[in-house]
Amino acid sequence: MILLTIPLLVAACHTGAGAPPGALQAAVPTGAEPVRPVTAATATLRDTIQAILNRGVADSAFPGAIAMIGTHAGPLVTVAAGHLDWAPSPVPDANTLWDMASLTKVIGMTSAMMQLVESGKVDLDAPVQRYLPEWRGPNKDRVTVRHLITHQSGLPAFKQYFKLNLSPDSTLRLFFNEPLDTLPGVRMVYSDIGAILLGKIVERVSGETLDGYLTRHVFEPLGMHDTRYRPPATLIARIAPTENDPWRGRHLRGEVHDENAAALGGVSGHAGLFSTARDLDRLARVYLNGGTLDGARLASAATIRRFTTVWDSTFSSRALGWDTPSANSSAGHFMTRPAFGHTGFTGTSIWIAPQHDLYVILLTNRVNPTREHSRIGPVRVAVADAAMRALFPATVKALQGGAASPSSTSRP
């Protein structure tokens, strides 16, 4: 069982409370433990990650995976394992396209919201009805944009409206009409519906489609040329297949795995993007370089800090769009705030630790051929821990006494 083998493997190879946010640095922050010499640390790390991913394939956690670990300057280690599918197929590489699932929320929707908030076009504390006046119902006038992006809106997690097989417009109306479960601001419920609404706010405020806005203002300027919704058939050979989907009656490849995103036409704020390890490296480096990369700018360092800092720790570990390390996250035992990251249901994850000038990207198709397992959880933790052990041993040693174990049953 992978629940046993992965922790044992990492041990053989040799999070918690938030800290006050510090200034985002463009390189290793002053006073932080420096990365160990590349020739020593990355050799150890590469071997350890290879063993972790090979074990994941052997234990049927996923048919293929790629891990990329790096700094503001670029990748230190890139390791692939397995194949794109369980049938004979190519080995994944940095240009393989993976279904991002809920990483769409941070790669896409949150990137757009950062820009619109920074430009003054969106006010986080304005009622959602300022931008979506047709979004009406009991207590919805009390829900702000901030409530949506921190998952405190009172909306339910999701609804299976895709099963009604309606048009995208009709499906969207159902999400708009969905009533609140609770008053806003009283608890955190991770909600796809809230992210769907945020994607529509981007469209309403910008006057562009969500995919059009992201392509023109985020992906192309940052050199993320492969990141897109609805990839064309010409890219099919590079795409990692996902589930043998009972709703659609076929093995998905190049179609969004999330059924509600598919019912909405393939473009949504909550899911739908496809991307590569190479493109996510560029996004992570933007965050580690204070909001810019190669002359292109996503947002200011202050805006990035604002969106990646826990908003209200009373309810959760959530920042604005992003998550932060907690006892049950995939960030592992040794990555602490102000680190931030997110996961995707298909087996994707990204964690960025500005205090260490570090990012950890893991891309898999763990839902191939079925979603009915949670073996990805320990793999995510093992990869994050391996990066910290190899590159920041003094930090790990200091934390080992009281670090809580992340839950292996957290949401895939």
Image (cartoon, helix red, strand yellow):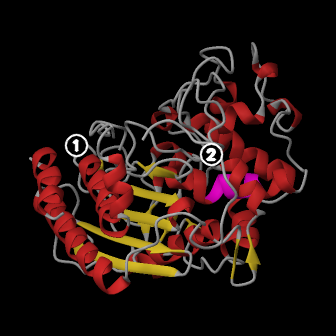
Query: Is residue 268 shown above or below 172?
Result: below
Identify the magenta region: 108-114
Can you give x and y, in whole percent of width and height, for residue 356 in the image?
A: 50, 64
The quarter of the displayed image where residue 195 is located: top right
> Residue 205 in magenta?
no
> Disc number at residue 321?
2
Residue type highlighted by circle 2? Gly
Q: Nearer the viewer, residue 165 or 274?
A: 274
> Disc number at residue 373?
1
Total labels drawn: 2
Pointer 2: residues within 10 angstroms few (<14), some, or many (20+)?
many
> Disc number at residue 407?
none
**Mark 1 or 2 closer to N-term?**
2
Q: Nearer the viewer, residue 3 or 163?
A: 3
Residue type highlighted by circle 1? His
Can you give x and y, in whole percent of width and height, for residue 10 in the image?
A: 18, 58
Can you give x and y, in whole percent of width and height, for residue 167 in the image?
A: 60, 43
